[in-house]
């Protein structure tokens, strides 16, 4: 991974935002490769890293979605008040910067992927790389659309063609185009042709079979986004994905291993190893209660109660992971001494420590040290997600094979537990334990959609894929959450359902931005629903 990602140092700054102008310099600068000699494989890790980085750490996921869907919680006082965006839906001093990060970084990923496509489209020997580039464009642009709604698409990524103020396409048209492109790209992958190199997905190594399963798993996820707004399209593409072949085991999980020593830092780990965050970021009561309710084996791996007292709660020394004492922090409370002070929350069990070394939040569970590693994995797609989505597809009557919803569900539950092993030995739960837990907690037909989507939330929550947990919550309505209605919140007391557009769009691309906003009920607001969010 280190060797693969070092190439990013050479590419940093070549494609800011969605512009690819600097590639023209390849034709004139004698110190750089020409367009014909440059190996476009070198761009692939840039695409993959920028994609996973777009929703990690302070790029948005941990500062917005992690607490919107009550995976994490924070008292958001003092030095860590930037978590007010997440826990209480209240503007912080840097909200405008945070909300633009996913947009900027994902468009950067799409730009690299677009340039890969342009450099390979007339080279049959590089068709696998071209199709991989298209798959990653689909992944990046779909994520932007899921977060923000309508987006520049047809005219995007074309600054070299003098299109610098791109119009916004509707999410409906974008999704249907992306599914069509994705289908063609997967079909075009060919194991008889040269494999892609410099693949940053840790266990892929350019393997065409794995990339096909990756593409079809992405297709399934995108198809299931549409079940409430376009059931026919959802059914068509879900069935096509299942027939093509989605992930079949945890060995197919798509993830990137971060490399802090060389500058490719896991943003979540960086955030949670910041002193103020160590102290104030805890697991939400909603998540801990969910795991405790079924004696989930993940609880003793993902959660710890810090060492007693203020000093112990502020440092990274390992706390107690005894499942019996884990307690989640309720969302929406602070340390300000008023009506919303944590000491006034229902079930509050007292401060930790004594005298000058006392803290009112010391007894609440925080993420364990595996999440504080700055070289931890960042997940893109998992076998657990795919199996849970197939369980829902079967429940909805889609023709996605002969496996029952109950078996897909059990596979997904077990896989979600096993995937934690990517964080290292201390996070590893054996397949036997995971399978036994899944068998002891089978799918109940009457509650199938609830169970499936609650597990989807738990899987992505414990793997720190916060944006995906939020997107699927919007789509499914599960888990059922009680929103925070903190004074001064920016969403009218409801859980935000989109990020508003970057402020630069209103100033630099005003006409197209205004046209897009005019299609949003209520305008460019956090509580508006996008096309598939019904």
Image (spheres, rainbow, N blue to C red):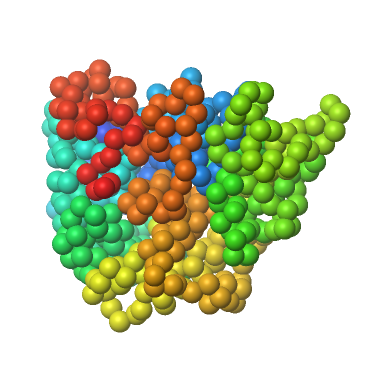
Vertical placement of residue 360 versus 289, above or below: above
Name the outermost residue toward the top: 507
Q: Position of residue 311 (x, y in %)?
A: 78, 33
Residue at x 60%, y 29% (from the top left corner): 340
Can residue 131 be seen in this snapshot? Answer: no
Residue at x 22%, y 33% (from the top left corner): 521
Residue at x 19%, y 60% (from the top left corner): 231
Q: Position of residue 407 (x, y in %)?
A: 42, 77
Question: Is residue 325 left or right of 264 when viewed as pictured?
Answer: right
Closer to us: 308 or 480: 480
Closer to us: 6 or 447: 447
Closer to us: 79 or 192: 79
Residue 128: name its quadrant. bottom left
Vertical placement of residue 458 versus 240, above or below: above
Question: Is residue 344 left or right of 443 when viewed as pictured?
Answer: right
Residue 525: name its quadrant. top left
Residue 108: name its quadrant. top left
Q: Position of residue 526 (x, y in %)?
A: 34, 32
Q: Position of residue 56 (x, y in %)?
A: 47, 42
Closer to us: 406 or 161: 406
């Amino acid at each position: 991974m280190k060797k693969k990602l070092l190439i990013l140092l050479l590419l940093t700054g070549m494609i800011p935002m969605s512009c690819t102008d600097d590639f023209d310099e390849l034709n004139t600068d004698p110190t750089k490769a020409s367009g014909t000699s440059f190996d476009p494989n070198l761009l692939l890790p840039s695409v993959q890293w920028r994609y996973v980085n777009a929703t990690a750490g302070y790029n948005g996921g941990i500062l917005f979605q992690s607490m919107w869907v009550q995976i994490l919680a924070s008292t958001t006082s003092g030095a860590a008040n930037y978590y007010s965006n997440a826990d209480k839906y209240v503007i912080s001093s840097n909200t405008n910067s945070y909300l633009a990060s996913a947009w900027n970084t994902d468009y950067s990923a799409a730009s690299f992927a677009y340039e890969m496509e342009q450099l390979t489209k007339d080279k049959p020997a590089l068709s696998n790389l071209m199709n991989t580039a298209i798959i990653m464009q689909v992944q990046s642009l779909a994520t932007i659309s899921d977060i923000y709604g309508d987006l520049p698409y047809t005219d995007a990524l074309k600054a070299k063609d003098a299109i610098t103020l791109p119009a916004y396409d509707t999410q409906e048209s974008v999704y249907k185009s992306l599914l069509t492109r994705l289908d063609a790209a997967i079909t075009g992958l060919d194991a008889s042709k040269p494999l892609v190199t410099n693949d940053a997905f840790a266990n892929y190594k350019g393997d065409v079979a794995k990339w096909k399963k990756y593409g079809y798993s992405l297709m399934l996820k995108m198809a299931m986004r549409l079940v409430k707004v376009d059931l026919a399209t959802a059914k068509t593409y879900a069935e096509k994905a299942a027939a093509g072949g989605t992930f079949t085991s945890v060995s197919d999980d798509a993830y990137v291993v971060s490399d802090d020593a060389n500058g490719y830092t896991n943003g979540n780990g960086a955030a949670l190893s910041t002193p103020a965050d160590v102290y104030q970021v805890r697991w939400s009561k909603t998540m801990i209660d969910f795991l405790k309710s079924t004696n989930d084996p993940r609880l003793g791996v993902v959660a710890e109660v810090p060492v007693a007292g203020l000093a112990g709660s502020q440092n990274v020394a390992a706390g107690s992971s005894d499942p019996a004492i884990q307690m989640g922090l309720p969302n929406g409370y602070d340390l300000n001494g008023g009506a919303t002070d944590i000491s006034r929350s229902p079930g509050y069990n007292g401060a930790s420590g004594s005298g000058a070394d006392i803290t009112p939040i010391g007894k609440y569970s925080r993420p364990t040290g595996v999440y504080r590693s700055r070289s931890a994995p960042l997940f893109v797609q998992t076998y657990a997600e795919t199996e849970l989505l197939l369980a829902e597809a079967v429940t909805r009557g889609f023709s996605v094979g002969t496996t029952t919803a109950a078996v897909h569900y059990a596979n997904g539950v077990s896989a979600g537990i096993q995937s934690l092993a990517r964080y290292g030995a201390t996070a590893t739960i054996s397949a036997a334990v995971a399978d036994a837990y899944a068998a002891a907690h089978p799918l109940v037909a009457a509650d199938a959609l609830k169970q499936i989507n609650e597990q989807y939330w738990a899987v992505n929550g414990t793997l720190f894929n916060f944006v995906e947990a939020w997107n699927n919550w919007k789509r499914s309505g599960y888990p059922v959450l009680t929103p925070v209605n903190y004074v001064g919140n920016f969403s009218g007391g409801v859980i935000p359902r989109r990020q508003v557009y970057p402020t630069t769009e209103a100033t630099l691309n005003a006409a197209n931005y205004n046209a897009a906003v005019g299609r949003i009920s209520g305008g460019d607001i956090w509580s508006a629903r996008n096309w598939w969010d019904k």
